[in-house]
Structure formats: structure tokens, C-alpha cells
Amino acid sequence: MPDLKLLDADPTEAERGAIDAVVGAEPEHSDRVVRSQPRRHLLLPALRAAQQRVGWVTPGALGYASRRLEVPPADAYGVATFYALLSLEERPAEVLHACTDLACALKGATVPEGAIASPCLGLCELAPASMRTIAGEHPREIQLPEERLPVHGDKLLRRIATGEPYGELRALARARELGPDRVIELVKASPLLGRGGAAFPTGRKWEAVARQPARPHYLVCNADESEPGTFKDRVIMEQDPFAVVEGMAIAMFATGCEKGFIYIRAEYPLAHERIRHAIDETGVDIELRIGAGAYVCGEETALFQSIEGYRGEPRNKPPFPVEVGLYGKPTVVNNVETLINVPHIVLGEDARDTRLFCVSGDVVRPGLYELELGTPLTELLETAGAEPPKAVLLGGAAGTFLGPHQLDIPLSFDAGVTLGSGVVMVFGRDADLVSAVLRIAEFFRDESCGQCVPCRVGTARQEEALHRLASGRTNGNERAVLADLTQVMRDASICGLGQTAANAVASAIENLGVLA
Amino acid sequence: MKLTIDGVTGEVAEGATILDAAHQMGIDTPTLCYADTLTPVNVCRVCVVELEGSRTLVPACSRKAADGMVVHTDSERVRTSRRMVLELLGSSVDLSTAPAALAYSERYDADPARLGAPPASAPKIDNDLYVRDYSKCILCYKCVEACGVDHQNTFAIAVAGRGLDAHISTELDVPLPDSACVYCGNCIAVCPTGALMGKTEFDLRESGQWHEEEQTEVDTVCPYCGVGCNLTLHVQDDAIVKVTSPDDHDVTRGNLCIKGRFGYRYVQNR
């Protein structure tokens, strides 16, 4: 036991039981046990378990988790206070998290008394949405509404659309026949670009990791889908979880990964359940990790930090994850949608390059649409039943607002605007664009990890300048300030969050004339 | 490895950073969160430079030099980012006791007032040895590193909260006497802004009697134990007002223990 000064609060029996279920029962004479393996990676699961048991992270639970995992209490406190869904203040066992983000705001979302306002819950097609968490001996988390909409697509979404059950893992068997090198060649020869937002060629990433001499290799499936307006990965995980696990298994096989992780945001309880079931059924060595409310953890290096039990603060790149990733080892990070493309590539059965679009907002038929790349945006808007809109937000809060005169573009990677995570949010004639822009600024201020100056302070100053413009109480310098903030956040932030925090705001000013 | 910085081509050893290379070539690059005794965290972003072929600016303090790099440390783009970083800091932090940040702000024509005013001073005085005023904290992580694995391995403090609310804290924000703090003061030694300050200095500043320009420095050896740490005594009006240790001393690397840093009053018992 390192020489730690511990909190002098004791956990209740219930909390001790919940934490022990994660970290193991405390051995007798624990002060004499010398552990060889650090177990810090269990910190977040332990804190989550304690909160699920009694509703919040009490000083006793924090202290007990610190002691059992040999994490200094100050450090554990730093981790606990990083994640928005962990509460260090007493609150009732039952809490309603009401989404007030972009898509839900378009549907008139409000925060009922006693509820907590939440950033995007990834249920945008069913807006307004919320999540109920109920702590206790049998904790429950319920997404509201519980219904699910039909999906529109016939390759990646075919099974979901037709209700056909998942058969045996045919593509994985085929991959094993082909061997790792051939699988990587197939993926490289395919047009597959990463679907998480950065559009990096998947095959090249796989090859880079496969070639790394350092061991072990890890695969991380990034299912921390938190970009406002995005819900595609949730739908896939809920309704076709075996495709995700099979894609991961193939990626692990091809790149020589000893172990896989899937990191799913905390707000997706049904996806946790379905993915856990698929992992158990298939026996693939995948560990399910659950977030705790932090958009930035979708950034791959922040995600590693979170899995390892730290605050989700992004690392500087280079070194890139393919060389130095999870636990410092070569790591493949792929998005859920990217991975479900893999079985199709391995089987060579359907070469169409399709992409999932999350349509929400002022449309008659919101939901998930699978389209071939290059499909005109106007066609998608028509299919979804949109009246000529005031604006469309493409790619999410880190994406771009397009005005009515700019909708005539193909949905492709080289359309000149980022498709990001496939968000197509429609703002109808009566939509309040000023509120939307202010909400995006607030979102980035809330979600900045706080590590680097440009993003920590820049996102706050951006929001303030926009509020001054919106209220008419300007001091005349807002335009210059916003331009400078855009540049410093883009140029000098550590990670993609800060680098893109001004994108949508700047596009609203430029393309829509909002607050201009 | 050969690289070019501001038109000058030089050679550096494998593993050197762009900052090392710049120093070697005599090019001055500002830093705030960097210290050569600590692991670079590259969070202040004041050291960013333009690297040809890179989409964004890169932090000189931690980006490893590579063969053929072409770097600009004083381009318009770099100057804009540095100015903005300093304006952002100046608008959110009381920099009045942060000489380096103030000098850089002047050098880059930073005008923080156009972004807002920093919060009022809020010193936390919960012990006799040192004072924490987080209104002066730029969140450079140096104190956390010094308290943690880089130096002291005490782990009394960490960064807590998120975004603009991120701050240095003990567990549950308990006062220092209830925390793991051992009062080595190694956090004070690395603090670049005076957010952490010895109580003696704090009291003298409060009463307007801190006169740095009148102080003399006397190097000696700590009398307490056999390690032999070098001490630098900062003397004002024939009294010791602060004790530090040189960063380049091969025993201390700037660190001391509670006795060396704070146990000097007996010298003044007359």
C-alpha cells in the first residue's frame, strides 16, 4: 500500500458492496497485500457503481474506491469531478436528465422541475428526449422515449430494416481463411474512410498498427457518440450489435490485437445491454467500458485516458495512437459505423460505399438514412419530408450551417463541407437560429476539458461575445474578437474539440448572417 | 538531425524538442507551463510555433525535432496565437505577480481587457506556511506534477472540475492541513504566477513591504540533515524572507523539504 492519506469518511455497506462488485472483495489483512498490477482503470467503473447504488458519489465511496484502487484521493476527486454524470453532491435516487440540445430545442424541449438539463442524448430522431436514472439495489437507466423508428437503408441497415436475425459470423470465418494480410489489403483497396468524423483511410490505420513491433496491440471501438445530432451508432448498437462485434473481431484478427475495448457513452443503456449480450454470445475478447458524461472522451486519446482511469484530457499528437495508444501500446481506434462496413468488405458482397445520415429537426420523417456517397443533400431532405428550410446543420456542433442557397451539394467527403458524424439537422422556417448558435457555443464551453488555454478560456469568451451580440449590448469589438478566437482555437488547441469549436458558429455568421 | 528555425539551419541530437533546438540556436521562445525539471504538459500553448506541413501550430516544448523540419517562431500566425493565449489568460487570471506572463503580454501586444476582467483575488489561508490564490492560477499543472510523480510523490493536489471551472484542488477541496500535503513547498518553487506563495512573502506584499529589488541572495547548504541540499536565502532588511534551491542543483533540482524551505526562523532568533 503506498503511503496515501485517505479521506476519513467510511462507505456504507451498500456502497462497499457496489464497489467490491467492480474491484473484487477486499482480502483480509489487506494492508499486507502487495499488488503487482495497478488497477486504476477500475476507478470510473467503481465510481459509477457506487453512484448507481445510492444516487451520488459520497465522500465515503470516493475514499473507499481510492483506497481499494490505490489512487490518491485528490486524484480520484479530480477524475470524479471531470465527468458530468457523476454527482459529488447529494441528490435523489431518481433523476431525470432532460435534453435541451439542438434537436430537442427544435421540438420545444423544456426542463421539468427537479430535472437536470442535459447535452444531446443521441435520441434526436425521437426529440424531445430524456433519460431517467434510478439508483438502488437494482439500478435502472431508461431512455425516453423508449420506442424506436424504422430505419432507411439496404446495406449497412438491411438487417435492421428487414428484421432479419444475425446469423453465424460468416465474415469473421472468411477473414480467418484469408489471413490478416489479405484482410488488410481488402480494406485498403476499399474506399472505406473513418466514419467518426475525421475520415482517415481505415486500411492504412490497420496496416500501421499491424506492423508495430510493440505488444500487445489494442483495438478500441469508439462508441462515445456525443456529437449533437448524432445517433447512428446508437441505432446500430441497439439493433445490430452482432455486426459491431463481428467488425471488431475482424479488425482485431487483422491487426493482431490481443484485446478489444468498446467505449460506449453512458447515455446509451440499451446499447450497453445489447452489446454486452453480443460479446457474451460470441466470446470475442472485448471489454465493454461505459463513459460518464464527457463529449471530449470521443476524442481518441481522451478516450484512452478515460479507459485508463484518468480525466478525459486529450494527449498531444504525435505520437499517434497507431504507435502509442491505449496503455501506451499500438492501438486501432475505429468508429462503430466504420467497423460494420468491414464484414461487407471481407465478404465482397456489396461494394456500394454508403454512409449513415442522422436526420432530425423540422422534417416529417426523421431517422437514420443510409445513402450512397454523392447523393444530393436536397434528395435526402425531400425523402425525409423537409419543407424548404431556413438552414441545415451538417456534421453536428463541430460542423457547418448551410443556408437555403447552399443545399445543392452532394453528400460526399469532397463536397467542400465536412459531413462529420453524418448529422443532417433541419431548421425550418420558424426555427430560432440565434438560440441554436448560442446553444452550440454553450455546448463547447461546457464540454471543454479545460486543459489548454485556447479552448478553456476561448470557448467561454466566444459564448460571451455571441451573447453580447444577441442582446444588442455590444461593445463594438465582438466581430474582431470572434475572428481572433476562431483562429487561436483552430491553430493552438490541443485537440479537435477546441480546433472545431468555432466552426458552426463562424458558418452561421458567414452563411446565414446570424448575429452578423 | 538537421532542422531550420527562422531561416537558420542547425543540428540537434535525437530526442531534442523544437524548444531545445531553438534554445540551442539562441532563438527565444516564450514558455509558461514548461519547466526543464518537469514533464512537459504543453497546455499553456504560448510556445506554439508554425511547422511547415502541419495543419495546426505545434507546441515547441514537447514536439520532437525531426530531420528536415522547417519552423517559424515569429510568423504572423504564431504572433496572433501567442497574443490571443496571453489575452485569454489576462482576461481570466490575475497576472499581477506573474512577471513572465506580463512581459510576454507586452511583447505580443496583448490587450486582455477587450475580453473581460479577471476575478478578484481570493487567497486561501489555511496554514502558517503558504498561501494559495487560485485567481492567479493559469492551470499550468506544474504544482500537480511537482506534488506527484515528477518530484514529491505526495499527491495532495490534482486538477478537478472541467472547462473554465477546472482548478487545482485537494480531495473534496478540504483545507491543506486535512490533506496529504507535507509542506515541502515544491509546488511554490515551480509556480510561475505567484498563485502559490510563502506566507512571509504574502504578508510582506499585503503590507506593501515586499521589495524584491532590494533583496540579496545568499547560497548556503541546508543544516538539517546529511543530504546537503543547496539553499538560496532571499534576504531583505537583514532577514530571510524566502528560501529556494537552484533548479540546476544536481541533488535538489529545485526541491526542498519543509525544514529546508520553511525552517529558517531560528536563524533570526536574536
Image (spheres, helix red, strand yellow):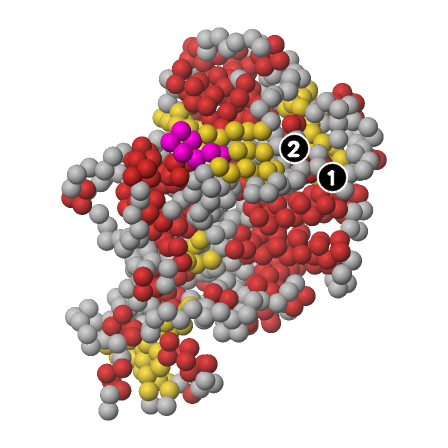
Frontmost of labels 2 and 1 is: 2
Residue B39 located within the stretch drawn in magenta: no
Residue ID for mark 1: A401
Disc 2 residue crowd, few under 14, some 14–19, many 20+, Cα 10 Å: many
Q: Main secondary structure of the magenta part?
A: loop
**Is the residue at mark 2 from the same chain as the one at mark 1?**
yes
Residue at point 61%, 21% (across, down): A148
Would you name the residue on which mark 2 appears? A128
Left or right: B253 in relation to A463: left
The percent position of residue A377, horizontal first and vertical second, equals 75, 27
Q: Residues within 10 Å of mark 1 (few under 14, many from 20)?
A: many
- Residue B216 is situated, as x and y percent measured from the top left of the image, at 37, 85
- Disc 2 from disc 1: Cα separation: 21 Å
Question: In the image shown, does A435 or B35 lie closer to the viewer?
Answer: A435
- On what subunit does the disc labeled 1 rest? A
Asked if residue B135 lies left or right of residue A104, the reply is left
B122, B89: nearer the viewer? B122
Front residue (pair A330, B158): B158
Residue in the image at 40% along x and 71% along y: B125
Question: Which amino acid, by three-letter code, is at mark 2?
Answer: Pro
Badge 2 sits on which subunit?
Answer: A
- Amino acid type at circle 1 is Phe
Vertical order, A258 against A35 (above or below) = above
Q: Secondary structure at mark 1?
A: strand
Please provide the residue range marked out in magenta: A133-139
